[in-house]
Image (spheres, rainbow, N blue to C red):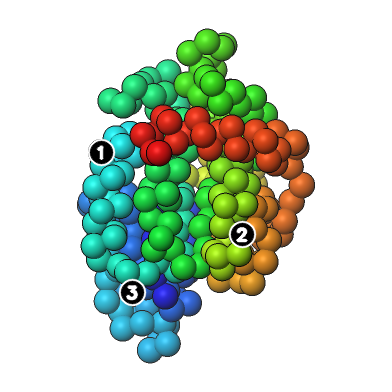
Amino acid sequence: MISVITGASAGIGAAAAVELARRGHRLVLVGRDAGRLAEVAGRVAEATAASGPDAGSGAAPDTLTCDYASFDDVRALAAELRSRYPRIDVLINNAGVMTTQRRLTRDGHETMMQVNHLSPFLLTNLLLDRVAGRVITTSSRAGKSGRLDPADLDRERRKWSGWLQYGDSKQANALFTVELARRLAGTGVSATCFHPGVIRTGFAPGTFLMWMVKHIPGMGQTAEEGASTMVHLATHPDGADHPGRYFADRAPAAVPRGMSDPELARALWDASAAAVGLD
């Protein structure tokens, strides 16, 4: 079973990679930093070697680098994955970023919207004919605060706030899942998304929230705890039996209309396809 995990060089992506390897998944780890990916690949190899022959031989997983702030990089990643793997059983869209500074990528989009939504949207579409099982996307309960406007994904015409835009991008992850599940109905491929929790990692550095998570005992979760729902969706029947749903704590969870509205989801899909240059 081949599972591709983006954002796998640290945090919940790395933790999920280790656990999935223990469960027998053959992994392809994607991240920006080749050195950090190599470190995670070593941890995965150790985990499989220690788990016995059913988990694998202890060989290191494949690693590929990609900068999600570049659509060219994403297209190159998709081409490489297509050339190597005729079948992908699980595609996990986990790469993400949070920043309080408004910056544009080389493609002209706000960084969080591109990295968190547009690039995984592009990669998924480029690989859909190879995905045979599940598409899992890391969303967040921050999406509940999103006020997404498909005509203004980059917040050029609305009030700017890093957390507001982050909420928009996480709302987009949930809506992408809704529309993707609709399009995949009857194919045997399922799409879900999930909230990992508030994790004690290097995510969103410099923000007051992450300062509290790191300094107030008991406030945040470990990367392994945060990865548990990702692993659940990749391995449990829930990941196939609840297409289009948002999960939290390894179970389907209710979300506001803004994260589940099928009409908004279709409008976002069309806007996203135009933004990344897909027909």
In this rendering, which labeled residue sits more in front, label 1 or label 2? 2
Of residues 208 and 63, which is closer to you in this image?
A: 63
Q: Residue at x 75, y 36 (%)?
A: 257
Of residues 166 and 136, which is closer to you in this image?
A: 136
> Hey, what amino acid is under mark 2?
Ala
Q: Is residue 199 left or right of residue 238?
A: left
Q: Residue at x 62, y 38 (%)?
A: 265
Of residues 190 and 47, which is closer to you in this image?
A: 190
In this rendering, which labeled residue sits more in front, label 2 or label 3? 2
Dot label at residue 46: 3
Q: Secondary structure at mark 1?
A: helix
> Dot 3: within a 10 Å radius of its alpha carbon, few (fewer than 14), some, or many (20 or more) residues?
some
Up-down: is 146 above or below 140?
A: above
Q: Is residue 163 visible?
A: no
> Hey, what amino acid is under mark 1?
Asp
Dot label at residue 82: none
Dot label at residue 185: 2
Q: Residue at x 62, y 52 (%)?
A: 182
Q: Residue at x 67, y 29 (%)?
A: 145
In this rendering, which labeled residue sits more in front, label 1 or label 3? 1
Badge 1 or badge 3: first in the primary sequence: 3
Residue that protrudes farthest toward the front in the picture: 279
Up-down: is 269 above or below 226?
A: above
In percent of width and height, residue 202 lies at: 43, 40
Q: Is residue 73 left or right of residue 129?
A: left
Asked whether the residues under the numbered discs 2 and 3 touch, taking CB atoms below 8 Å apart as contact, a structural biologist would say: no
Of the 4 image quadrants, the one containing the N terminus is bottom left
Q: Is residue 240 left or right of residue 110?
A: right
